[in-house]
Image (cartoon, rainbow, N blue to C red):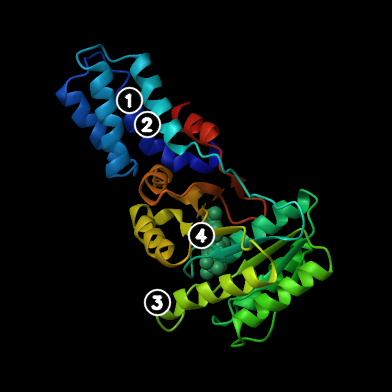
Amino acid sequence: IKQGLTKTRNVFSGVLDLFTSNRRVDKAFLTQLEEQLYLADVGVQATAQIVDRVRQGFLDREVGEDVKLFVRQQLREMLIDPSAGIHHVETGPTVVMIAGVNGSGKTTSIAKLANRLKLDGKKVLVAACDTFRAAAVEQLTVWCDRIGVDIVKQQQGSDPAAVAHDACERAKARGYDILIVDTAGRLHTQTHLMRELEKIHRVVGKQIPGAPHEVFLVLDGTNGQNAIAQAEQFTKTVKCTGIILTKLDGTAKGGAVFAIKQKVGLPVKYIGVGEQMDDLEPFDPDSFVAALFE
Ligand code: GDP
């Protein structure tokens, strides 16, 4: 993970450097800590919380390893979430719906996720419900062939809810463990898109009680704080259960995972760290924070 986070680690070194200086926790130090955390894209709210706690616990004390460890623990605790990865249901297919705007890395992430689940021994089916974008189905088909997982699709322009319906029937009838449902990343209007997502959600739930069991929103990690505004907009209509944060290998804005958790209230479940099939990692707060501090 360290390798995938090189750029984020670089900006984070600005935070770490503060702890090596021979000084006291005073107003100037706290201001600098605030600036550096903010520069690392940790977000206003999360930054304020940490700075406040450092002030409460360490004001006028010497800056040292204990302060550094405290900040590290605060960051780690911020990310801890009981719901890691995918919650698999015991009987019937587990349905994972994937949303996200075009270009966020949705198709690639679905492929990577399908690959990962297949390697875990799961029987995986993919539903190509982004029937709006030309080439979306095609692109997904190429990935599925490469990985060796099955796909349910219809021609471009067909009703995505019908594709979802078919896919659920097939998943139940043929004993698939996991159904991953792709959705449109853009429609004529935002309202239209949100309605379509709701509809797919409903259709899936009718076919398979309790489904979708997970709704992951794919966010482009290079967007940093802008990704958060996008997440807030999506989660207003469709209840999401987690985030897949992509392209962390190419950005210094990996600190956004803190802001996403604090501000949107959603755990990052997976992170994308490259363009290849195996460049998706389950998000682990411990190793993420360790990678930034070590
Ligand atoms: P979609 O439009 O949301 O389906 O996006 P795609 O899956 O087609 O991805 C858009 C571009 O981002 C492609 O060139 C992908 O190879 C690239 N991409 C996706 N995920 C990652 C990632 O984690 N790291 C890097 N470096 N590139 C990625």
Badge 2 vs badge 1, beta-carbon distance below 8 Å: yes
Spatial CA distance of label 4 from label 2 is 27 Å
User: How many residues crowd around disc 2 within 10 Å: few (fewer than 14), some, or many (20 or more)?
Assistant: some
Query: In the displayed structure, does residue 213 sit left or right of residue 62?
Result: right
Q: Mark 2 points at which residue?
A: 13
Q: Earlier in the sequence, mark 3 or mark 4?
A: 3
Spatial CA distance of label 1 from label 3 is 44 Å
| On-image quarter of the N terminus | top right
Q: What element carries label 4?
A: strand
Spatial CA distance of label 4 from label 1 is 33 Å
Return the residue found at the far left.
27
Q: Mark 3 vs mark 4: give the one in front.
A: 3
Q: Mark 3 points at which residue?
A: 190
Q: What element carries label 1?
A: helix
Badge 4 vs badge 2, beta-carbon distance below 8 Å: no
Residue 218: which disc? 4
At 63% from the left and 63% from the top, the residue drawn is 211
Query: In the displayed structure, does residue 115 sit left or right of residue 230?
Result: right
Q: What element carries label 2?
A: helix
Q: Does the residue labelled 4 lie within 8 Å of ligand 1?
A: yes
Q: Name the residue under label 1.
A: 17
Badge 1 vs badge 3, beta-carbon distance below 8 Å: no
At 43% from the left and 61% from the top, the residue drawn is 235
- Where residue 194 appears, as percent x and y from the top left, is 45, 74
Amino acid type, mark 1: Asp
